[in-house]
Image (cartoon, rainbow, N blue to C red):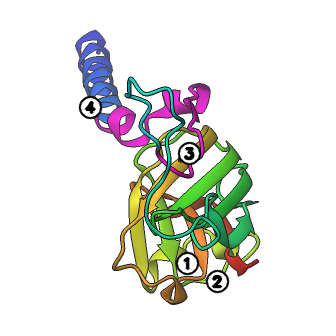
Amino acid sequence: MRKRWRAALIAAAAGAVVVLAVALPLFQPWRLFTDKVVDEALPSAVPISTNSSSTTPPTISGAPSSHRPTAPEILLTGKLITHEHETSGTVAVLRLPDGSRILRLENLDTSDGPDLKVWLSDAPVIVGKNGWHVFDDGRYRSLGGLKGNHGSQNYPIPKEVRLDDFQSVAIWCDRFNVSFGAAELKST
């Protein structure tokens, strides 16, 4: 009888080790207690080289300055709402003076998680649990991995991406196919 208990105990311990070996890397529960803060500056409006021995201030050649924007232009904006995890902050799609576009997350505050991505999506933003899983149902474009779960960060939008094809931004957990939070994009 004692040998059976010992064999059962050993089998249970071996089973627990196997479950933990699979579950820990998959769920990464320690991320509930970790944070990564990223505070990127807004890309500069006009790059100017200061590597010169001249005492004359630098000038920018080309089109007249009245026709060239010197600050980013706000194309779309939105406010993040909570889905699977408490999430807040704002999003903006900006056109930089050089014509490139970025998605900017400002004052982001969400949970850390495994395999988080920043997505543009054609899905509507739905409040509550019904909105958690909609962002991969249609068209979406990943702008890359989330750099940090707190702070302000920039994500380049490739030239070929048509903004008219998308109406929302999602902080998407690719591992569990769920939105941590999302924002509807609106024209300014």
Q: Give the mark nearest the N terminus, 1 or 3.
A: 1
Q: Which amino acid does label 2 sit on?
A: Pro
- The N terminus lies in which quarter of the figure? top left
Q: Are marks 2 and 4 in contact (CB under 8 Å)?
A: no
39 in the magenta segment: yes
Q: Give the mark nearest the N terminus, 2 or 1.
A: 2
Q: What residue type is labelled 1?
A: Val
What x and y, as percent, mark residue 88? 75, 51
What x and y, as percent, mark residue 60? 48, 53
Segment colored magenta? 22-47
Q: Nearer the viewer, residue 95 or 118?
A: 95
Q: What residue type is labelled 3?
A: Gln
> Mark 1 — residue?
134
Cα distance in 3D space between marks 2 and 3: 23 Å
Residue ID at (64%, 83%): 124
Cα distance in 3D space between marks 3 and 4: 38 Å
- The C terminus lies in which quarter of the figure? bottom right
Residue ID at (71%, 69%): 77
> Mark 4 — residue?
18
What x and y, as percent, mark residue 177? 45, 64
> Mark 3 — residue?
153
